Image (cartoon, grey):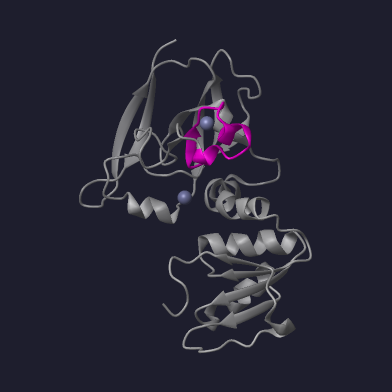
Amino acid sequence: MSSINITTYKGSKDGSIVKSSTTKPDLTDDLVLLRITCSGVCGTDAHYLDEDMVLGHEGVGIVERTGPTVKALKKGDRVGFGYQHASCGRCDLCLSGRETYCAQRAMYGYADKDQGSMASHAVWSEKFLFPVPEGMSDADAAPLMCGGATVFNIFEAYDVRPSSRVGIIGIGGLGHLAIQFAAKQGNDVVVFSGTDSKRDEAMKLGAKEFYATKDVKRLKLDNGGKIDHLIVTTSALPGT
Ligand SMILES: [Zn+2]
Ligand SMILES: [Zn+2]
């Protein structure tokens, strides 16, 4: 087997996206070669537009080849990958499902900068590839790999259970996914957004109540204002 040539799209000093390439050695251990079919665009990608690194960390692709110790994946499988590429797999954090905090983690932005989802192919460890269910399109699956995982994790980490009243501030990439997760889990979803411009969209996605917050000094909420969990998806709190 020969080395693997990959076409990539990188950031650059002036912020323009440039076509480039990288070469990986033939597959060892649990490495998997994917042909990328779809990439999401995450807000974090904008932070790295002027960096000399491959962009994109919301990828979906088809397995083309597998390394010698790959167990669960095979050629033709459809998988996604996200922000994290590796962790030690042995520390307390890894063993308790908190591998995003592993001291030896490898992540977008500082590790494996020659690879990303804005590319023709990628080579990643099987451990950080996630099968995409049948019936879900590549385009729908890709944004779940970072934006989706980020907000979904909140429901697990903070034990949000059905029938809670979940408040969500902001309806950007994260917020519109958080509304859907919260509503489909069986919660009452209360959305806070700057203006009314996203009211219809929020209600369609599953919100039960919607409040525009711009220039409002004091909000009067239904249900006595009780919110069990508040998910803040904005970089600044309303009014700040
Ligand atoms: Zn992201
Ligand atoms: Zn670890």
Residue 128 sits above or below residue 181 on the image:
above
User: How many dots with numbers?
Assistant: 0
Start and end of the magenta stretch? Answer: 82-101
Instruction: Give residue 98's quadrant in the image.
Output: top right
Q: Is residue 44 left or right of residue 158?
A: left
Q: Is residue 99 left or right of residue 107?
A: right
Which quadrant, please, contains the N terminus?
top left
Residue 1 sits above or below residue 21 on the image:
above
Q: Nearer the viewer, residue 140 or 57?
A: 57
Residue 169 sits above or below residue 54 on the image:
below
The residue lying furthest to the top in this view is 1
The residue lying at 50 percent from left, 45 percent from top is 58
The residue lying at 55 percent from left, 33 percent from top is 128
The residue lying furthest to the front in this view is 92
Q: Is residue 96 left or right of residue 237?
A: right
Residue 176 drawn at (x, y percent): 58, 64
Residue 102 drawn at (x, y percent): 50, 36
Q: Nearer the viewer, residue 231 or 142?
A: 231
Residue 182 drawn at (x, y percent): 69, 62
Residue 38 drawn at (x, y percent): 51, 43
The residue lying at 53 percent from left, 70 percent from top is 170
Residue 176 sits above or below residue 72 on the image:
below
Q: Nearer the viewer, residue 109 or 35?
A: 109
Which quadrant, please, contains the C terminus?
bottom left
Instruction: Give residue 131's quadrant in the image.
Output: top right
Magenta stretch contains residue 214: no
